[in-house]
Image (spheres, rainbow, N blue to C red):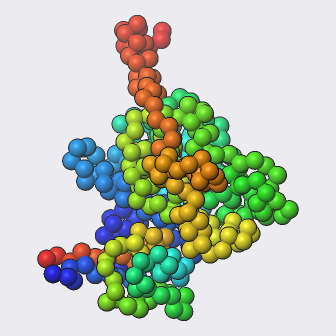
Amino acid sequence: MPSDLIHEYMRIDHLPQIWCAGCGNGVIMRDVAVAIDQLLKDEEYDFDRDDFVIVSGIGCSSRAAGYLDFNSIHTTHGRAIAFATGIKFANPKLKVIVLTGDGDCSAIGGNHLIHAARRNLGLTVICFNNHIYGMTGGQYSPTTPNGDVAATAPYGNVDRPFDIALLATGAGASFSARGDVFHARETTEIIRKAILHDGFSLVDVYSICPTSYGRQNHKGSAVDMLQWQKENLIPTAQFHAMSEQARAGKKEIGILAFNDYPEYTDEYAKVIEACRKQTGGKGRN
Amino acid sequence: MVGLKRLVVEPLWCKGCGICAAFCPRGVLEIEKGKVRVAALERCVFCGQCELRCPDYAIYLVNDEE
């Protein structure tokens, strides 16, 4: 028997999940479940379980939509945000949560990501960023660090990587954040705030992939990779208290951008209203 | 009173990654033959680090009713 949390929010007949030993995705998926659990139990909000929709694309990350026991849809590669856009438009009251990966959301689905961010469409995109295409055998992705080895870059990756949180910020996301597997409690809190945010929210969560990425790049075991996160990914308050010198090679974990832009479906509802007024409720013609 | 919390292991779900044992602040857990084993329960302070970090949900705390 699993814990009450897992029993409540996951399809336990599909568990244990298929992710490799030490893969960080299970921790991120648990963070999502805990964040939703906190929102459902919070009396300040009147959430119903059916207010949450989980949408995923293709890749290791996207298995999560099959495990999380909510209204969920496992879509095609790169198109999770496109499907989520349709769901949000059909019923703007829903909290639509997209679980995606670095390849799914910044390569194949890169355009959907930047335009959903630009429009400030009220989705929550959580990227399980393992810095590689794990499921298909370890090809480099848009977030694989420069110089790292991958199945398709045996002499080192020539590309410069995307920083997905900064990419979303640049594209106009009103909420952009970075989390990781090691700082699970902090990341859960970021995800909770991202879901509550009225507008496009992105959380780029650094996963660990000891099997495909770690092994090719001599990053050691899952424990070593988590230890690296502990030492190099620093929560906001602590990060800003550090000297420039001490920050070298380290990254900030936390909410990186927050703006109160109008949400897209709210703005669209105004267009519908204006159209109705002008045409006496009949639409055009 | 102590003993209101219990440490539970689901060996069928454990993949033996060793994260729980490495991050247990009290050295309660070890990996034996590819599975987690509670080696020193008397040292456990029921902090929940293992449950927080296990990617496979194979170890967790249960709050027994008082």
Q: Residue at x 52, y 50 (%)?
A: A242
Tell me the quarter of the picture where residue A139 sits.
Answer: bottom right
Q: Residue at x 54, y 92 (%)?
A: B33
Compared with residue A261, is residue A112 higher up or lower down, i.e. above or below?
Answer: below
Q: Is residue A268 visible?
A: yes
Q: Position of residue B36 (x, y in %)?
A: 47, 86
Please name whichever residue, B25 or A225, is drawn nearer the observer in this view of the structure. B25
Farthest residue in the right direction?
A155
Q: Residue at x 52, y 55 (%)?
A: A234
Q: In this view, does A140 lie to the left or right of A76?
A: right
Please name whichever residue, A61 or A178, is drawn nearer the observer in this view of the structure. A178
Please name whichever residue, B24 or B63, is drawn nearer the observer in this view of the structure. B24
The total number of labels drawn is 0
Q: In this view, does A111 lie to the left or right of A178?
A: right
Q: Position of residue A34 (x, y in %)?
A: 36, 59
Q: Can residue A116 be seen in this view?
A: no
Q: Is residue B52 left or right of residue A167?
A: left
Farthest residue in the left direction?
B66
Q: In which quarter of the image is the N terminus of chain A?
A: bottom left
Q: Where is residue A27 in the image (x, y as percent from the top left)?
A: 47, 65
Q: Where is residue A198 in the image (x, y as percent from the top left)?
A: 40, 35
Farthest residue in the top direction?
A278
Q: Residue at x 60, y 32 (%)?
A: A171
